[in-house]
Image (spheres, rainbow, N blue to C red):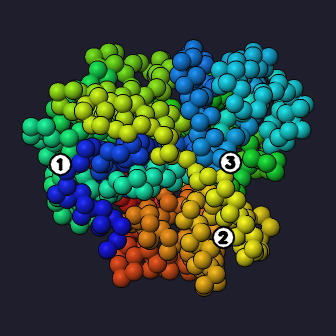
Amino acid sequence: MSLRRANLSRISGGLFDVLVVGGGINGAVSAASLAGRGATVSLVDRGDFGAFTSQESSNLVWGGFKYLENYELPLVFGLCRSRNRLMKAYPDNVREIGFLAALDRTAPYRPWFAALGATAYWGIGGFGTGRPHLLSAKDLETEEPAVDTTTVRGAIQYQDAYLVDNDSRFVFSFVRSAIEAGASVANYVELVHAERDGDRWVCTLRDTDTGEEHTTQARVLVNAAGPFVDAVNDDLATTTGHRIVYSKGIHLVVPRLTTTRHDRVLAFFDDTQRLFYVIPMGHRSVIGTTDTRVDEPFTSVTDDDRDFLLAQINDRLDLPAPLTRADVIAERCGVRPLVVSRGGSDHTEADWTTLSRKHVVERDDARAVVTILGGKLTDCLNVGAEVAADVEALGVPLEDDLHNWYGEPATATRAEFYRQARLMRLDSLRTRPDAEPLTDRLWRRYGRRAFDMLEAIRADPRMGEDVMGSTDYLRIELHNAAEHELVVTLDDFMRRRSKIDLVVRDEDIIGSPGLREVAEILFGADAERRLADYLEAKTRREASGDQLRPSGTPRPA
């Protein structure tokens, strides 16, 4: 029986302390926190885990330097502390990175003033990163020759952090933590109906992959539906003091733009005096993000979006040739669910970008519902702790928080893996000089499960071979995903458990001789259907220009 089927079997007919609805970062971290403290937990999402807002982020774990513009000091303080905790807990996955901000004559701040802000930001963050620096235009040209310094007055460099792999894989790490702590989780399962009956919720669930319906019960519901949180609360007949509005943001993935050998984020003020970034993603660069008010969570990248970002970056980098739409390898588009007071103003375009990026957790004691509104990847550990406190206040007893429901394995365990990998000369399986060492990659992605991968490669050297050429995924990683990572569609693996869809052009993926083997390993007898669904969805997205909704993401009812 597959892991997903086994989990769904436990959910069906079960009685849990908590049912978490929504498997983005808020739902995943809530399930991990609660299960790690002894609660019986089920987690469902009507699409794949991390398949909506949580897969469209900038892949940054940051304290929000730009939020100082609006004097949101408490928010920046909390985010910086969260960033520091994540860097300590996930040293191989969340790494410090430099932000190099070029300030030209149209920037709203002079370099010396921005340097003061960067120093204050460093202090607010408890000096948890490297110190900031003020650079002249000449210094900037030396540090990053790709930047056009013609109109630049100076620059600052400050430090934050980023996710080495993609955001949705980081979300899935919390799903795995929840499973290992005893939670029952299932993707592609939607909440159809919920009714309060005495001291519990009786919930009807539907498997969106098979159409089967199941019933489960829970004492408390956690609404972690992200952009859909208000609609879920309407169905639950619960109200909150806050609601969600939507801000659309896009990113364009292009060939690597920076010329320096080490990873660094470039920051610029665009023509509207809003910060945007060039973020490294392996051999690619990610340009973004925008901030546009929209009225619904379903969005797509438009030609105007593409042309705006391309024009901004072409004006600020000294490239051999201007970037065009043909240079775009992949696109990311999603909405930020922003929190506003219920009954407050709708907010005009003039003050739209000043809306806070904070999160709010609210509790309905009468209905036994905890609602999470807003939130960021950086703030996830705080969300997990706050949700646990509210669930406990609703009468669910929890064990003391030992903070063992998150983080990478112990240093000694890591050292033993590296010792074994060195003895079997794991890194010698790689011949490309620019490829990341296999030891680093397998440990970062899989932790303790990487030991089993070593054993599999020892037993069968073919398990250490790349399946799709330059995509850097071994055959054993596919077998691991099939067994442990609840992959239901091919898109789940290509877009979220890995980042292949983000860094490889569609035509190269479709033409890869290894794509069929990927499907066969993941789905066995069902490979042909899953492969056909994936290729059809990719062709449909190319024709429509809709880069947002890969197979498995929720659509409007």
Q: CA distance from mark 3 to mark 1?
A: 45 Å
Q: Which residue is mark 1?
A: 217
State the mark number for residue 3: none
Q: Which residue is mark 3?
A: 280
State the mark number for residue 470: 2
Where 43 falls versus 343 (above or below)? below
Which one is closest to the eye, mark 3 or mark 1? Answer: 1
Q: Is residue 40 left or right of residue 261?
A: left
Q: Name the residue nearer the viewer: 106 or 175.
A: 175
Where 63 falls versus 226 (above or below)? above
Q: Amino acid at mark 2?
A: Ser
Nearest to N terminus: mark 1 or mark 2: 1
Outermost residue on the front side: it is 400
Give the image location of residue 471, x and y in percent: 62, 68
Residue 308 visible somewhere in the drawing: no
Q: Amino acid at mark 3?
A: Pro
Q: Is residue 135 left or right of residue 294?
A: right
Residue 36 visible somewhere in the drawing: yes
Q: Is residue 547 left or right of residue 427?
A: left
Give the image location of residue 37, x and y in percent: 39, 42
